[in-house]
Amino acid sequence: MDDQTALQVLTRIFAEEAGRNNALTATIVGILSALKGHPEVVDAVRGTLESQYSDHLATTHHQAYIDGFERVRDLVYTALGNG
């Protein structure tokens, strides 16, 4: 496989993954928006996110991964309400 073909394949794979991630994020945000009136769910989701975030900060050395996690976390917090 030449470099141009390999680049086209990688670009397609990344674009497809981005589309999947966006669809999953939109779905999760929609579900969480519907559940924001249930404090126990909000607290559980926030607790899980903060625990995972702390773990990732301690073990992940890729800033792009942390940046992506933070963007989704912020979307989730917005969907849950910023309380």
Image (spheres, rainbow, N blue to C red):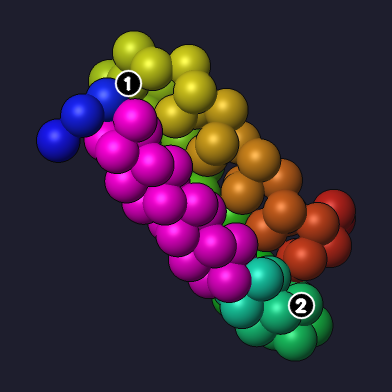
Q: Does the magenta stretch mainly form a helix, a strand or a loop?
A: helix
Amino acid residing under circle 2: Ser
Query: Which segment did they paint magenta?
Result: 4-25
Left/right of residue 3 with respect to residue 76 in the rendered view: left
Residue 60 is labelled as 1
**Residue that appears at 54% across and 62% down:** 19
Q: Which of disc 1 and disc 2 is earlier in sequence?
A: 2
Does the stretch in magenta take in 13?
Answer: yes
Q: Residue at x 62, y 47 (%)?
A: 73
Q: Position of residue 20 (x, y in %)?
A: 48, 66
Crowding around mark 1 (Cα neighbors within 10 Å: few <14, some 14 to 19, many 20+) is few
Q: Residue pushed farthest left?
A: 1
In what quadrant of the picture does the N terminus appear? top left
Q: Considering only vertical position in the picture, is 26 above or below 72?
A: below
Amino acid carrying label 1: it is: Thr
**Residue occupying the point 34% across, 13% down:** 61
Looking at the picture, tell me which residue is in the foreground, 15 or 69. Answer: 15
- Confirm whether the magenta stretch covers residue 72: no
Q: Quadrant location of the C terminus?
A: bottom right
Q: Which residue sits at x=32%, y=46%?
A: 9
Q: Secondary structure at mark 2?
A: helix
Front residue (pair 39, 22)? 22
When the figure is inspected, residue 57 is found, relative to residue 22, above or below; the finding is above
38 vs 12: above or below: below
Query: Which residue is under mark 2?
Result: 33
